[in-house]
Image (spheres, helix red, strand yellow):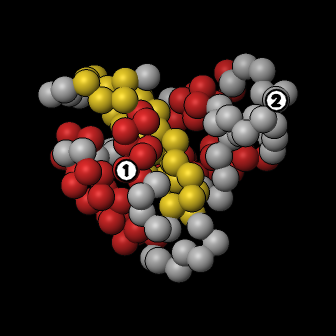
Amino acid sequence: ISFWFLEFLGTAEVESALVKHPSVAQAAVIGRPHPVKGEAIIAFATLTESNEEDEEKLVQDLRVLVRGEIGPFAAPDVIAITPSLPMTRSGKIMRRVLRKISAGEADQLGDVSTLADPSVVDTLIDLIAKQET
């Protein structure tokens, strides 16, 4: 998935910027349709065990970090702090699961038999529902 605003931007660039923050252990970025921009940038981040920052402040800091590293156009529309990401047993992030959950299509996840921890799906569904309100 790539985003196009004023220039071409890939998810890896945004993920790399996010993990530069000392509190972020892992990050995954997806695109979600947006009525004005075409694609909204949705970021998911897991935190290091040593993190003690306030979540709202951390989200603001992460947006500032991405703006500084890449530019204002790359700041995520949503940054969801999550205890874990949907990973396969071999350690790959299942971005399609993130896309479906983010789009409100959690009932259409497809084959998730390779998820290392299937409970992460319910956690993410709840998290996104809270982000939307």
Q: Write the residue at 64% across / 72% down.
A: 49
Q: Earlier in the sequence, mark 1 or mark 2?
A: 1
What number is the disc on residue 114? Answer: 2
Q: Nearer the viewer, residue 43 or 35?
A: 43
Q: Position of residue 112 (x, y in %)?
A: 78, 27
Q: Nearer the viewer, residue 56 or 61?
A: 61
Density class for disc 1 (Cα within 10 Å; few <14, some 14-19, many ≥20) is: some
Q: Secondary structure at mark 1?
A: helix
Q: Quadrant of residue 3?
A: top left
What number is the disc on residue 129? Answer: none
Marks 1/2: CA distance? 28 Å
Tag 2: amino acid: Thr
Position of 51 compared to 66: left or right?
Answer: right
Q: Write the residue at 52% across / 35% down.
A: 102
Position of 49 compared to 128: left or right?
Answer: right
Tag 1: amino acid: Ala
Q: Write the residue at 68% across / 40% down.
A: 86
Q: Position of residue 9 (x, y in %)?
A: 30, 29
Residue at the right extreme, as displayed: 113
What number is the disc on residue 17? Answer: 1
Q: Position of residue 51 (x, y in %)?
A: 55, 75
Residue 115 visible in image: no
Q: Quadrant of residue 4?
A: top left
